Amino acid sequence: MLELVSSYSFSNVPYIEYDALDAYATAIVGDYCPENLLAPAPLDIEVMLEFYLHLNVEYRQLGYERTVLGLTAFSSGFVQVIDEQTGKPEPFFVKSGTVIIENSLLEKRNMTRLRFTLGHEASHWILHKKAFSAENPFFSNAEYENQYLAAKEGRIDYSRKQQERTDSERMERQADFFAAALLMPRPTLRMAFVEFFSYYKEKPRRIIRGKTQLDDNYAKLLPRYIAKEFKVSEQAAQIRLEKLSAIVDNRKRGYFA
């Protein structure tokens, strides 16, 4: 796998600009599955975890309220899951390199959430192994018995205004952004963007929400089109397009154009 080139904080969290993260995600997709950079298509994210990243993916009920959608173990230890037979919490031993996904995401209606959660956990493994390493004395996660554990909580998709006040918050935002960049690589996202406008017999252009009724319509239709092309949620597609300034609320330029 291609290694991340970045500076790191004292606690081994990468300091990296989001355009560089975007480029790294594109390089990872190209290394794993070059054909996914030739035309818009859904990335087989589960196969990527198992055969490219060599992670073991398990599906278990992670809690009664199902607020935690995914966990990644960077060190062997125990994780609490719900026993399918008794319905009670029980310790579940996992080896380093195990990803546990909330089993309710296997329902068809949760397909896009499952894909984003797998992408999020893959992103932690790609970006944050140094931070979660047992050899790193400057980072700990007291929330879990196995402190070398990254968790994805139950947000549908990554937030526009997620804070980065702590190392954990910075890593969550990086993992969310990187997951979106893996599932919607910028080169093929741009192709889909051009195809969208071609369908309406227009030149590709930035959509300025609030400028005209046509732009407002496009601001709704484009995320729907992108979501279908890449098998992601419309919300994930919309936020990705906004972060790349393909859809804006003003004339501020971004690096997508």
Image (cartoon, rainbow, N blue to C red):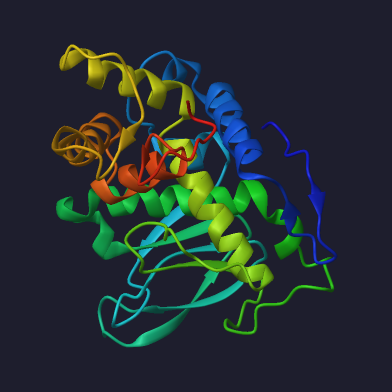
Comparing 247 with 75, the one in front is 247
Which image quadrant is residue 28 in? top right
Which image quadrant is residue 3 in? top right
Residue 121 falls left or right of residue 42: right
Q: Position of residue 184 (x, y in %)?
A: 41, 34
Vertical side of 133 occupied by 166: above or below: below
Which image quadrant is residue 53 in? top right
Vertical side of 105 occupied by 193: above or below: above
Comparing 86 with 235, the one in front is 235
The residue drawn where x is 62% and y is 40% is 21
Residue 46 falls left or right of residue 94: left
Please say whether residue 163 is visible from this viewpoint. yes
Looking at the rendered image, the quarter that the N terminus falls into is top right
Q: Where is residue 81 in the image (x, y as percent from the top left)?
A: 40, 77
Comparing 157 with 52, the one in front is 157
Residue 180 falls left or right of residue 108: right
Count of numbered labels shown in the rendering: 0
Vertical side of 200 occupied by 232: above or below: below
Q: Where is residue 52 in the image (x, y as percent from the top left)?
A: 55, 34
Please say whether residue 40 is visible from this viewpoint. no
Q: Where is residue 76 in the image (x, y as percent from the top left)?
A: 65, 67
Vertical side of 132 occupied by 182: above or below: above
The residue drawn where x is 40% and y is 23% is 190
The residue drawn where x is 44% and y is 15% is 35
